[in-house]
Image: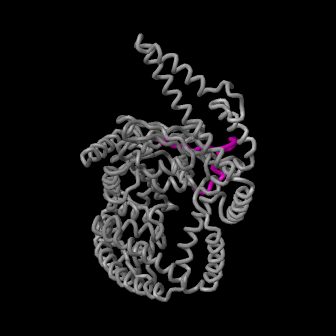
Amino acid sequence: MIEEIHLRDLGVITDARLPLEPGFSVLTGETGAGKTMVVTALGMLLGNRSDANSVRSGAKNALAEAVIKLPHDHPSLALAEDAGGSIEELDAESSELLLARTVSAAGRSRAHVGGCSAPISTLSDIGQHLIAVHGQSDQLRLKSSAEQRHALDSYAGEKLARLKKKYRVNYERFRTAAAELREVRENTRARALEAQTLEGALAEIDRVNPQEGEDEALKSESAKLSNVEALRIAATTASTALAGSEYGEADTPNVLALLDSARSALDQESAADEDIEAIAQRVNEALIHVTDIVEDISSYLSNLDSEGPERLAEVETRRAKLKSLTRKYGADIAEVLEWAQSSRERLESLADDPARAEALENELRELKETLTEQSDQLRTLREKTAVKLARAVTEELTALAMPNASLVVTVEETEKFSSHGKDAVTFMLQPHQRADPRPLGKGASGGELSRVMLALEVVLAEVDPVPTFIFDEVDSGVGGKAAIEIGRRLAMLAQHVQVLVVTHLPQVAAFADQHILVLKNDDASLSRVEVLSDEQRVVELARMLAGHDQSASAQEHARELLEMGKKAK
């Protein structure tokens, strides 16, 4: 719901804030005071085309801003976050979103979502989930066949939703199979060329037969073989230091000899002291460990002698073959092998397989039969729901001073399957029994169309609502009992959603939970906005009734209207 609307330099309003409550809020004021600027501001926040003429004379730009409270899972919050906007978390259940739009006197327009600059189209995407505006010139909700079908489906309830879900599973498979069959039939030459290319590449890879990790292993071996002399000298030097050299002096000191001397000296006295015995044991362990190292060095030197220049040439030749593959098919051998695997799978799918085409044709035939059956079920259910919806809306129209009018909802079969079935849904208004039904918005006045939309919204409120509804002079051209019924139904709608109504009729205003007055200043050049108390509402309703707010009889009538509005709730 909208918590506050802020207007600045818009039309005749310099700076005004409209705090809005849940339920039914009404906006009244004398002609020219600027009531429609609220609807204009909301249109700006819905992404409507901006108009430099809406900027107050002498001002640089106009601002429309709204603070909106929404549950955490509302789709508008996800859209705002995707646009980079900041969302303020209010409590465990709700968050707050700020939308803003500025229009310069030169006609340039900017939008902000959650404090972040965003395209105007983003406002439109977010706004369609937040606000439905029904004005004298614009009926922004239920204006397309798709939206009308969605409304009808929502009114049909869970049974249709389950059936449509099953239908969509088959429809998506139908689309996939049809695309695959089309590819099999239409791209034979391209597929053959691609298959030939893949076969050549895979044959090249198979000839080399690379193994995973082989490139890194060969790189290490190449480094070793390229430094074989230095490695031999290092290993020989280490061996001499540890065990001595068979070509050296007999008394040349080495680790093994020294450790053996130390062990002998300690062993001679180990019987006299347990500590000496423990140390002797440790020296003996060291001697065994060094002996193992010497044997490892000897084995290393033996292998090093066998890995001569011939092996280095083999390694480099193999590395060159692997390098040829990595230049073409991947950054390393792992990527080459991965590419080869995916290419083999692709090659299998490219093969002209008459059996595959036949299997797809059979699958499509079966799916088409299933979709036809399911779409017929959808149509039958929609047709039944259409009658029910039309009857409910027509009853509402009778109470809204359109006793001869009726809503006609048609469900017609289309040529092709779509994600929602095979139906086109159209809402039409029949002004009287002898008239031909016409699509909504054609042949009806702004006030009549607003009442039709009100009737629809009242009926759909429980199944297909948006958080906030705006009605601009929905009561145009009516009065008396019909006006009371309009007010009553607006109050009914407000039980499910937030409703803001611009009106001239006191019978409608009396049903509101909150009354907002737009007042002209004394010089009539600027306007301001006030939220009225109960007593102030009496005065304003008296003005609307008699044109004279101090009339005692008008004020008494105003109190009667307010009391009637309270009882109706």
Which residue is nearer to you in this view: 368 or 485? 368
As drawn, 488 above or below 414: above
Residue 20's image quarter?
top left
**Magenta segment includes 51:** yes
Residue furthest to the left in view is 567
Residue furthest to the top in view is 272
User: For this view, does 272 lie left or right of residue 383?
Assistant: right
Residue 561 appears in the figure:
yes
Give the percent coordinates (x, y) of residue 388: 28, 71
As drawn, 55 above or below 480: above
User: For this view, does 73 lie left or right of residue 158?
Assistant: right
Which residue is nearer to you in this view: 171 or 318? 318
Residue 533's image quarter?
top left
Name the residue located 31 percent from the left edge and 67 percent from the top edge. Answer: 162
**Magenta segment includes 20:** no
User: For this view, does 181 lie left or right of residue 54?
Assistant: left
As drawn, 221 above or below 8: below
Give the percent coordinates (x, y) of residue 280: 47, 19
Give the residues in magenta.
48-67
Which residue is nearer to you in this view: 549 or 500? 500
Residue 31 appears in the figure:
no
Colour scheme of the rendered structure: one colour
Name the residue located 42 percent from the left edge and 36 percent from the top edge. Answer: 90
Q: How many marks?
A: 0
Give the percent coordinates (x, y) of residue 522: 57, 36
User: For this view, does 321 lie left or right of residue 272?
Assistant: right
As drawn, 471 above or below 70: below
Name the residue located 71 percent from the left edge and 50 percent from the top edge. Answer: 225
Residue 21's image quarter?
top left
Give the percent coordinates (x, y) of residue 231: 71, 41
Name the residue located 51 percent from the left edge and 31 percent from the top edge. Answer: 288
